[in-house]
Image (spheres, grey):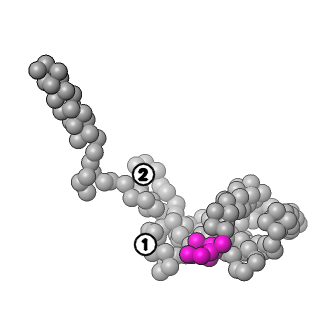
Amino acid sequence: MNLITNMRLTLIKQDAITKRFLHVSGILNKTQAGRYRPKAKQLQPLTYEMANPPHYICARKSWNSWNTSNIKGGNRPAETVVEDLFIRNFMEGTWHALCASEIIIKRQHNMIRISSIILRKLPAYKMYFLLGYSEHLLSYWLHCPVKLELVTTQNKEDVIYKII
């Protein structure tokens, strides 16, 4: 009798623990992915892409990676994701503290087009060197032609769309 009572108490305690940590109501769901919320005592500058929520993709904003490998029957979906991460890290490292917006990667047939907004902090000859350096190394490593389409701006404030 004592064993059965102990088992019941143990099961009741375990049931109480699971009920304590499992929330199924919509009221407690306070987080939303892809939205920037205002912070106390801090202003947040947002670009146009950051200001629009994710459900506006294809209406007001576009994808940051354009490829067809994730379509059913598409080739190399895993390799495409790894290459996109490599390209983003390479661009952030090569153009250190110069990228004013997000890096957009477009794959068209065998060509990769990379576009971004860059700050004009370097002289023109250094920008041209970094442009050729990036295109050449990425073309060599990815085994396909890579084209950088960069737009320059004087201030990072020119890219700011909204402040929350």
Q: Residues within 10 Å of mark 2 (few under 14, many from 20)?
A: few
Would residue 120 be found to the left or right of residue 101 on screen?
right
The residue positioned farthest toward the front in the image shown: 1
**Looking at the image, which is closer to me, 140 or 154?**
140
In the image, residue 47 lies in the stretch drawn in magenta: no
User: Where residue 100 sits: x, y (%)?
Assistant: 65, 63
In the image, taking residue 87 as reference, residue 63 lies left or right, namely left
Return the mark for residue 101: none
Residue found at the far top of this picture: 2
Where is residue 142? Give x, y as percent: 79, 66
Q: Amino acid at mark 1?
A: His
Q: Is residue 155 visible?
A: no
Viewer-side residue, 17 vs 158: 17
Q: Amino acid at mark 2?
A: Lys
**Is residue 148 something that shows in the picture?**
yes
Disc 1 crowd rating (10 Å Cα; few below 14, some 14-19, many 20+) is few
Which residue is at a point 67% across and 68% down the rendered structure image? Answer: 76
- Determine if the magenta segment contains residue 67: yes
| In the depicted structure, whether residue 51 falls above or below residue 39 | below
Q: Which residue has dot 1 on it?
A: 55
User: Residue 156's image quarter?
Assistant: bottom right
In the image: residue 112, left or right of residue 17: right
Q: Residue at x 13, y 19 (%)?
A: 2
Instruction: Give the Cα separation between the discs numbered 2 and 1.
Output: 22 Å
Quadrant of the snapshot with the N terminus: top left
Bounds of the magenta span? 66-75
User: Which structural element holds mark 1?
Assistant: helix
Q: Which residue is mark 2?
A: 39
Whichever of labels 2 and 1 marks the residue nearer the N terminus, that label is 2
67 sits to left or right of 14: right
For the residue pair 103 and 72, the one nearer the viewer reads as 72
Q: Residue at x 58, y 71 (%)?
A: 70
